[in-house]
Image: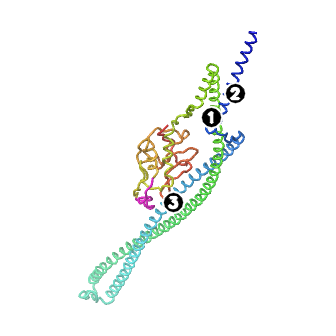
Amino acid sequence: MPNRQGGSGVRGGGVRRWIATASLCSVVLFGLAGTAVAVPPPPPNPSDSELQAGRGEANARAGEVGQLTNQLAEAESRLADLEADVQVKLEDANKALVDMQTAQDEAGQARRDADAARVASDGASAAIEDARADVDEFVAGSYQQGSTIGSMSAYMGSDSPENLLARAQLLGAVGGSQMDALDGMRKAQTEKGNADAAARQALQNAQRKQAAAEQAKSDADAARSSAEQAQQDQASRTAVLESDRSGVEQRLFEAQSRVSGLEGQRERFEDWRSAKQAEDDRLAREAAEAAAANDSGGNNGNDGGNGNNGGSRPKPDPGPSAPAGASVEAIVARAMSQLGVVYAWGGGNQRGPTRGIRDGGVADSYGDYRKVGFDCSGLMIYAFAGVKGLAHYSGYQYTSGPRVPLSQMRRGDMLFWGRGGRIHHVALYLGNGQMVEAPHSGSVVKVSPVRYGGIMPYATRLTG
């Protein structure tokens, strides 16, 4: 009997525990129903194959973008070389024009000198002919009549040898004077003739120089025209490549968006599953606590269970702390917030775009001094305003912080371009071969593919 009573007692305790458990199960069910808002139905969960396919497509598009970016970088480098070549050819044409004008002036002066020398030589020849005629007339008249020697005619009629000798000496003296004058005129004619010949030779040389200068000018113009045509052709090819890359970039963006969407769905599903598991664990824990309380204290324990169920829920996991590179995103966000702002040479400070300044050249031709915007280094000043004050000169910005090889560049680094050791441009690297920049007069702040032609070997890193 006692054993039977003990058995009955055990069965009675089991019945009481079953009732308490049944009641607690109803509490759990009610708790689950009551937490429907906190743990909603599961979101879509894309399959691994869907994620893999999406990532594969995105990688393929990224590969295309990379190839086209490299081709475009080469094309832009070629275009830059051709633009420089055009500038050189323009200067060659200017030089040829100056040389041609100088040669034309020299040829004109040589022509005038030759004309003057020819006139002088012709005049000297005419004077000599006149003098020769006078001498011939004098000699002939003297020997025939003697009248040209006036009072000396008495000697001319003398028959003595002495008188004849005196007469011959007198004629010789007068004729010698005339002949001396004639010789002097002949000498002057020779000098004039030599000057005339030298002037003609100088004219010929000047005309040859003029012809050579005109040919050089023609060649320089042809070279300039050819260089400009090559530049235009390359610009057209570059534009086609840029258009092709833009199309592939759009497809890459779409593929990445799809992958992001699928990964977002997977992430939300994982979050839901974690929340659901946490809720299930909490309810199970409360059920176990209620059961233990029921065993020890009966209804009071159950009430305590209800009290726990009605208590506040545990605070959600605040998640990981902000990453160390959050300031990089702030820098990028500041730079990207200025997309579309016009380029203004000398414009930009820590507070935003400012009016440009005069440069006496290209920027003035675009009216930058009338615009409010950024130049390349001004955009960097604004982007890094919360990190470091930068000088408004890309050369100083290049040395404003630690430098890392281009192979190690990362989002938020500054990239620089130079020629002949002098920095002339800076941009902010965004990652994935992209950068944000204020490129040049006539343009706006925009996102561009990284150009590797003329890029400096190091990036400057001010954060991270």
**341 to 34, vertically: above or below:** below
Residue at image coords 64%, 45%: 261
Between the C-alphas of marks 3 and 1, the distance is 71 Å
Q: Earlier in the sequence, mark 3 or mark 1?
A: 3
CA gap, disc 2 and disc 3:
97 Å
Q: Is residue 302 left or right of residue 341?
A: right
Q: Amino acid at mark 3?
A: Lys
Q: Position of residue 327 (x, y in %)?
A: 49, 40
The image position of residue 14, as x and y in percent, is 71, 19
Q: Which range is magenta?
A: 360-374
Position of residue 247 measured from the top left corner of the image (x, y, whole percent): 63, 54
Task: Say if 334 sits above or below 305 in the image.
Answer: below
Which residue position holds label 2? 22
**Residue 374 drawn at (x, y percent):** 45, 53
**Residue type (three-letter) at the residue carrying disc 2:** Ala
- Residue at the extreme top of the image, as rendered: 2
Asked where in the image residue 173 lies, by quadrant, the reply is bottom left
Question: Where is residue 373, by image quadrant?
Answer: bottom left
Question: In this image, 241 relative to 201: left or right?
Answer: right
Q: Which mark is residue 89?
A: 3
**Amino acid bearing label 1:** Ala
Q: Earlier in the sequence, mark 1 or mark 2?
A: 2
| First-in-chain label (2 vs 3) | 2
- The tag on residue 275 is 1
Q: Nearer the viewer, mark 3 or mark 1?
A: 1
In front of the other: label 2 or label 3?
2
In the image, 257: left or right of 110?
right
Instruction: Say which of 296 and 83 sits in front.
Output: 296
Crowding at dot 1, Cα within 10 Å, few <14 / some 14-19 / many 20+, comes out as: some
Q: Secondary structure at mark 3?
A: helix
